Image (cartoon, rainbow, N blue to C red):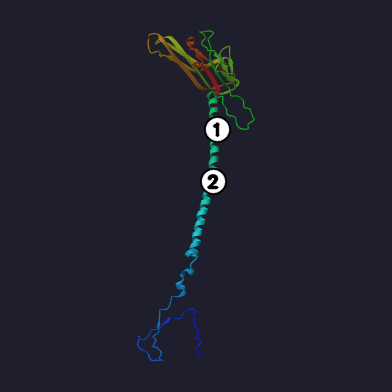
Amino acid sequence: MSHQQTYDHAYPLPQVFVVDGGGGQTHRGALPSMIPTWSFPPAQEGVRNPGKRRGCMGVSSRLAMLVLLLFALVFASLGMGAVWTVNLQKELKEVKKMVKAVNKSTEGLARMEQFIAPQKQIGLFEPALKEEKVVKEERPAAHVVVRNLDDPKQKTLKWEPRLGRAFTTGGVVYRLEDGALQVNQTGQYYIYCRVELIFRTCDSTSRFDHSVFVRRAGRTSHLMDAHRRGFCPTDKGTAWTTDSYLGSVLHLQKDDQVLVNVSHPHYLTHAHYANFFGLYKI
């Protein structure tokens, strides 16, 4: 009768080795003496094949996901940097355009400033307001230069109102008959006058007077006076050049006439840039 045995395939049976009894003779019909021995049990299948629990190429899935996430962050940073660089280049182009426009406007203003600088000095320039349609009245002003004397003994000087830089505007009138500047508005005026003289025989006694006066309602009154003496450095009677400048802010009334006197008019140099007279309303 045969016995049916069952085996647990999950845990294999140990191998059995048969060892004889030393090589002696055995009796016929007798079974040789066998000594069974067992080997150590084999390692578990899970231990023998540890690679089955790992991912692709021996890398765990968590580590692979971490690496992919790092790569995604790197590429996202590179993309954001590229976008920021493009935006920065656009802004730089806009800034360059604005700088060019400002430079052009600055050059235009500088040229205009050079053009209107002489007018500013005499009070003619007044910048126009944008979109202003009201035409303002011109400011009263005048600048006249010396002219050749008809009578060298005439102490009240006469002037040229149209030659070179000379002009009259804003209702100021130059009176040709007596050399006066007549104003048509009451107000505060800056009045100035410069004369230059050459003394051919200048000595310690040489002197001259320079004055600006106003004629109002048939009466005259002095506005500014200058008295020069002792300006020659020697007593030898050599030629010498001297000058006098008068300037002040004074109140004038409508129809006032302003004139200039010099004690030695025949000593004037007659240079337009050295002898002039003018006024303008403040």
Regarding residue 243, the answer to whether it shows in the image is: yes
- Disc 1 is placed on an element classified as helix
Q: Position of residue 245 (x, y in %)?
A: 47, 18
Q: Position of residue 211 (x, y in %)?
A: 49, 15
Residue under circle 2? 86
Give the CA distance from mark 2 to mark 1.
28 Å
Q: Position of 168 compared to 16: left or right?
A: right
Residue under circle 1? 104
Q: Position of residue 266 (x, y in %)?
A: 49, 9
Residue type, numbered disc 1 = Lys
Residue type, numbered disc 2 = Val
- At horizontal 50% and vertical 22% (from top left) the residue drawn is 248
Name the foreground residue: 269 vs 13.
13
Tag count in the figure? 2
Residue found at the far right of this picture: 133
Q: Position of residue 279 (x, y in %)?
A: 54, 20
Q: Residues within 10 Å of mark 1 (few under 14, many from 20)?
A: few
In which quadrant of the rendered image does the C terminus lie?
A: top right
- At horizontal 52% and vertical 54% (from top left) the residue drawn is 75
Q: Residues within 10 Å of mark 2 (few under 14, many from 20)?
A: few
